Image (cartoon, rainbow, N blue to C red):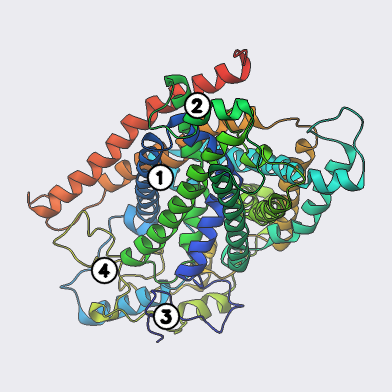
């Protein structure tokens, strides 16, 4: 077995081609989560900081949002784990059972624990709230990803605008917005990045995520550099009388009005939305124990928070050098188009947006593919039924799990309730538990045909006999991606969509459903000593109280923010 490295990652496996194994390291999971979260939305944070008070209220809002986002991701992962069949059945290992059966159970658990997971957002919602929640949550994730893809396409076109206009002169009097040349440039980039949206998993995109983070970091440094020059009055940045008159407003502790506070809150929330990719990334993470999951989430959220603070605070300072004394929703629009440094920033942001497209398309693609596979057409023409040899090879697989973390009896443990059940340090349950497979000491069915039939419904969980084909993934991905790009060609401004999606869909997707599902599914779990009134029980109750508080905070906030977004979009004279 390969031991954990000092940085917490597992050594890379030589079997990169085995797509049915967990191959994700903490580093790859971190980059994938960051590239899902950090992108073009970070350019709106300077406006949010300027509106809410960049000296005090804005940093507090950013910090609180990051803490709540981290906790909601933890709740989402827990709810996903609890929605698996073994948790639903309340199965547990019999410590006093036959030693041979226990040994067999441990061996099977070890084998299965390195299989790729199949937990999905819509299945978790269905297990928590019923079958109708599957349709609702699937539609919610697809809508968020689809509209985000449209928004990123429009933002990509805007970033390419100076380059395109220098080659093809736009019509006289034409400002920003769609033209034939600008749309053509955007479509060319979309076609070039399309193959990445057809890849089967997110771990394969780990290098893409790293490149995306390097690009967005460059954008942040460019904005920070120009803003510092503005404050110091160097670099030839103009400061006219109007800008000077608003100098005192470039640094403030409190928002100027409640309206501006309401306008800014969705911008903070939308900056941490990555929940549609949390479970797919977790499905591919090797040895997803509690410590590793928390390390992955923590080392993703806090670097993003630091970056957000830097670009938000420094970008808001540039209000001193704008004629209006404020900044726009896209901070790059406040800089001169012929500024060579910001031209570099635009190119880097274009790269970031381009590399983020697969992270937005793949979640919607996978949900649609799973929905198609649930139809008679998908089961008949697109799915492949595992044969006896495939199942036998999977069941008898003796591949070592790349973990060596001093577990009792060599078990791969969850240990995911340390916050809730302090008396139970290691919960000896597999993160992936199979129905009708002989896990827990029971032998598999002797009837091969019956075994194959039982396996057909869970073949993706086993990792043998893929339930979707490459053709299905490719066709669905291209339909989603290209249709979003086609709609973006006719969109003048994405502000309306961002306001509505950021204030309603994002809150529901990232906070309300994960917290509600955790409360529903965690209530069904049973642990020894949970009702003894001890410390474990108090931690369990505290965790549930936190989930309830988040629901009570975000439910009315969603209603208020949505109403404010509708007012801004359709009734404001601004």
Few, some or many C-alpha atoms within 10 Å of disc 1 (few <14, some 14-19, many ≥20)?
Answer: many
Q: Quadrant of the C terminus?
A: top right
Of circles 4 and 1, the one toward us is: 4
Residue under the image location 26 percent in, 77 percent down? 407
In three-dimensional space, the C-alpha distance between marks 1 and 2, rounded to whole angstroms, equals 35 Å
Q: Earlier in the sequence, mark 3 or mark 4?
A: 3
As helix, strand or loop, the secondary structure at mark 1 comes to helix
In three-dimensional space, the C-alpha distance between marks 3 and 2, rounded to whole angstroms, equals 47 Å
Q: How many marks?
A: 4
Question: Where residue 121 appears, x then y in whole percent?
Answer: 48, 48
Q: Front-most of 450 and 473?
A: 473
Asked whether residue 133 is in view, the answer is no
The answer to whether the residues at label 3 and label 1 have Cβ atoms under 8 Å apart is no
Q: Quadrant of the N terminus?
A: bottom left
- Point out which mark residue 127 bears: 1
Residue under the image location 39 percent in, 56 percent down? 84
Residue named by callout 3? 402
Q: Earlier in the sequence, mark 2 or mark 4?
A: 2
Few, some or many C-alpha atoms within 10 Å of disc 2 (few <14, some 14-19, many ≥20)?
Answer: many
Residue named by callout 4? 428
Question: Where residue 221 appears, x then y in whole percent?
Answer: 57, 55
């Amino acid at each position: 077995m390969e031991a954990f490295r000092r940085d917490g990652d597992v050594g890379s496996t030589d079997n990169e081609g085995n797509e049915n194994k967990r191959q994700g390291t903490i580093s790859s999971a971190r980059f994938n989560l960051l590239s899902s979260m950090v992108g073009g939305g970070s350019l709106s944070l300077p406006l949010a900081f300027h509106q809410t008070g960049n000296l005090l209220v804005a940093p507090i809002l950013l910090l609180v949002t990051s803490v709540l986002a981290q906790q909601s991701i933890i709740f989402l992962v827990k709810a996903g784990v609890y929605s698996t069949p073994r948790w639903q059945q309340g199965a547990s290992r019999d410590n006093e059972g036959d030693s041979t059966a226990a040994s067999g159970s441990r061996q099977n658990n070890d084998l299965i624990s390195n299989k790729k997971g199949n937990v999905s957002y819509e299945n978790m919602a269905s297990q928590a709230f019923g079958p109708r929640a599957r349709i609702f949550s699937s539609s919610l994730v697809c809508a968020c990803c689809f509209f985000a893809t449209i928004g990123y396409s429009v933002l990509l076109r805007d970033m390419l605008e100076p380059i395109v206009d220098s080659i093809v002169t736009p019509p006289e009097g034409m400002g920003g917005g769609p033209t034939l040349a600008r749309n053509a440039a955007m479509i060319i980039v979309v076609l070039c990045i399309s193959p990445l949206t057809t890849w089967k998993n997110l771990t394969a995109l780990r290098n893409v995520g790293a490149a995306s983070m390097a690009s967005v970091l460059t954008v942040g440094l460019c904005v920070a550099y120009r803003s510092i020059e503005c404050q110091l009055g160097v670099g030839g940045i103009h400061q006219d009388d109007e800008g000077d008159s608003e100098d005192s407003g470039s640094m403030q502790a409190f928002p100027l009005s409640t309206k501006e506070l309401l306008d800014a809150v969705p911008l903070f929330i939308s900056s941490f939305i990555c929940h549609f990719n949390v479970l797919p990334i977790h499905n591919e993470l090797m040895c997803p124990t509690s410590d590793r999951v928390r390390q992955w989430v923590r080392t993703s959220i806090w670097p993003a928070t630091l970056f957000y603070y830097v670009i938000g605070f420094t970008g808001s300072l540039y209000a001193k050098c704008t004629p209006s004394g404020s900044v726009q929703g896209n901070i790059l629009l406040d800089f001169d188009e012929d500024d060579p440094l910001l031209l570099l920033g635009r190119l880097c942001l274009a790269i970031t947006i381009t590399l983020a497209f697969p992270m937005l398309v793949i979640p919607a693609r996978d949900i649609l593919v799973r929905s198609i596979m649930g139809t008679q057409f998908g089961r008949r023409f697109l799915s492949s039924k595992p044969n006896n040899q495939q199942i036998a090879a999977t069941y008898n697989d003796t591949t070592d799990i790349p973990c060596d973390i001093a577990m009792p009896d060599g078990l791969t443990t969850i240990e995911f309730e340390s916050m809730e059940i302090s008396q139970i340090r290691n919960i000896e349950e597999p993160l992936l538990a199979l129905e009708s497979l002989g896990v827990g000491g029971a032998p598999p069915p002797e009837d091969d045909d019956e075994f194959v039939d039982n396996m057909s419904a869970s073949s993706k969980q086993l990792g043998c006999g893929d339930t979707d084909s490459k053709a299905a993934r490719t066709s669905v991905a291209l339909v989603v991606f290209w249709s979003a790009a086609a709609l973006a060609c006719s969109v003048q401004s994405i502000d309306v969509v961002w306001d509505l999606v950021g204030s309603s869909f994002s809150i529901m997707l990232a906070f309300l459903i994960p917290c509600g599902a955790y409360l529903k599914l965690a209530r069904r779990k049973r642990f020894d000593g949970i009702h003894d009134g001890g410390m474990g029980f108090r931690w369990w109750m505290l965790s549930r109280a936190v989930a309830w508080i988040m629901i009570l905070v975000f439910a009315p906030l969603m209603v208020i923010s949505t109403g404010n977004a509708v007012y801004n979009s359709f009734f404001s004279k601004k």
